[in-house]
Image: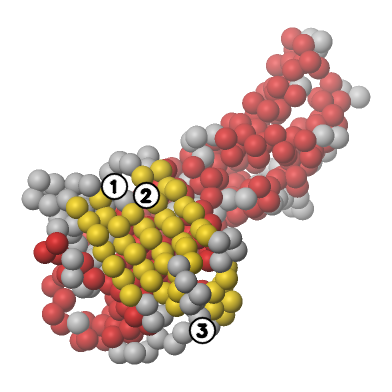
């Protein structure tokens, strides 16, 4: 048996520990930010099967380049990571970590091999992993293109709703036009650039092309989010929203919101402190609408807070009521704007700040409408350059 085969079979016998080591390295790596919001199981998914293919190819049992190979040659990895919103640099980083792990595991065996065997083994292993990575990029690109096509269809389907929206919100027409213009211009520009490059060079897994696709998807999603939020505001004002009452554990819901906003919190270097009493805190309400209230309040706090802490408290205050308190150390709100901040499209600005926070001013308007729908009330305390505290009082049933 050749030295490469012996090394490959050793790796095949240790699929599970190698998989665990790889996942742990991915979770700990600061350059793979997309993994932070995923569970161990989500990251693992197809990795044992992928490693089996790599090790069998390393042993010379299969050829990854053959079109008729019936093994998963990395396609599932690229497809899965596209769904999980990894970028290409993060996928490349995953394979770099894998190489480090495998070389470390084979270190003792390589040290007793001849120089020629060491060079041949490392070269073959690198070649196999690079070929699998290329297949991953190929399927990743195809998935991104599919997402782009789906987004295009969604934009077409929302066109009719957007037309009706403009009729219902003529006073805000100029504002909406301004907000939609920038991402729409980016979509057109990046799409045109991508298509012109494709006419010169057929589809290939290049970083430039993937970057253009990412930009189109990002800007397209901004438009859809703006349209969807505005449609939701319109539905509230027309009384078209129907509530679904169900048993909800507020503490579990708060944990879910905290996890979903973790990356946004970390991106700005903020600290999130969340607490819930008693635990569990069971209520009867519309789970989705309650989650929207908390998410929008925390997202608003993140948007207007440059440094410091955001605190979220859910607490039962009587036999029939509970409160949600969201406080931040942000720019604050003047008393003159206390009422206006709940109006659609209104955003807090300060004369000494040249940068206006991202957003269109719909988050707090949605919160205000939802609180009314759930039979509650909203209170605000704020001080300029100190921070703001929103208190929501809601019925337990």
Q: Nearer the viewer, residue 92 or 59?
A: 92
Which tag is nearer the camera, tag 3 or tag 2?
A: 2
Q: Nearer the viewer, residue 57 or 298?
A: 298
Report whether residue 198 is seen.
no
Mark found first going from the N terminus, 3 or 2 = 3
Q: CA distance from mark 1 to mark 2?
A: 7 Å
Percent of width and height locating residue 255: 53, 57
Outermost front residue? 318
| The N terminus sits in image quarter | top right
Q: Is residue 109 left or right of residue 367?
A: right
Outermost right residue? 1
Q: Which mark is residue 244?
A: 3
Report whether residue 78 is seen.
yes
Q: Are marks 1 and 2 in contact (CB under 8 Å)?
A: yes
Percent of width and height locating residue 374: 41, 80
Q: Residue at 48% x, 67% y: name it.
A: 316
Label 2 sits on residue = 310
Helix or strand or loop: what does disc 3 sit on?
loop
Label 1 sits on residue = 329
Q: Is residue 160 left or right of residue 351?
A: right
Within 10 Å of disc 2 (Cα), the crowding (few <14, some 14-19, many 20+) is many
Task: Give the colouring mode of the picture.
Answer: secondary structure
Mark found first going from the N terminus, 1 or 2 = 2
Q: Residue at 60% x, 54% y: name it.
A: 80
């Amino acid at each position: 048996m050749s030295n490469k085969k012996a090394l490959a079979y050793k790796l095949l016998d240790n699929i599970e520990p190698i998989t665990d080591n790889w996942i742990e390295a991915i979770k700990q790596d600061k350059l793979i930010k997309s993994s932070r919001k995923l569970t161990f199981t989500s990251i693992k998914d197809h990795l044992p099967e992928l490693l089996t293919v790599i090790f069998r190819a390393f042993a010379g049992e299969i050829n990854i380049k053959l079109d008729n190979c019936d093994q998963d040659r990395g396609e599932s990895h690229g497809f899965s990571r596209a769904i999980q919103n990894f970028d290409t640099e993060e996928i490349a980083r995953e394979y770099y970590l894998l190489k480090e792990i495998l070389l470390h595991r084979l270190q003792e065996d390589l040290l007793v091999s001849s120089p020629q065997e060491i060079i041949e083994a490392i070269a073959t292993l690198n070649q196999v992993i690079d070929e699998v990575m290329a297949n991953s990029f190929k399927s990743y690109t195809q998935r991104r293109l599919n997402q782009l096509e789906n987004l295009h269809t969604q934009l077409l389907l929302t066109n009719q709703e957007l037309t009706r929206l403009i009729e219902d919100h003529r006073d805000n027409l100029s504002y909406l036009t301004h907000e939609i213009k920038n991402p729409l211009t980016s979509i057109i520009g990046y799409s045109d650039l991508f298509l012109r490059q494709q006419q010169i060079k057929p589809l290939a897994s290049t970083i430039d092309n993937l970057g253009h696709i990412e930009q189109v998807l990002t800007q397209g999603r901004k438009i859809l989010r703006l349209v969807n939020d505005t449609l939701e505001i319109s539905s509230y004002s027309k009384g078209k929203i129907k509530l679904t009452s169900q048993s909800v554990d507020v503490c579990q819901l708060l944990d879910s919101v905290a996890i979903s906003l973790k990356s946004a919190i970390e991106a700005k270097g903020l600290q999130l402190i969340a607490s819930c009493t008693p635990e569990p805190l069971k209520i009867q309400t519309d789970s989705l609408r309650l989650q929207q209230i908390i998410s929008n309040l925390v997202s608003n706090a993140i948007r207007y807070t440059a440094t410091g802490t955001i605190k979220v408290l859910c607490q039962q205050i009587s036999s029939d009521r509970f409160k949600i308190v969201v406080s931040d150390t942000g720019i604050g709100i003047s008393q003159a704007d206390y009422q206006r901040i709940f109006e659609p499209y209104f955003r807090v600005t300060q004369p000494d700040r040249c940068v206006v926070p991202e957003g269109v001013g719909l988050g707090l308007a949605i919160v205000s409408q939802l609180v009314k729908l759930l039979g509650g009330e909203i209170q605000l305390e704020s001080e300029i350059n100190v921070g703001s505290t929103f208190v929501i009082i809601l019925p337990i049933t």
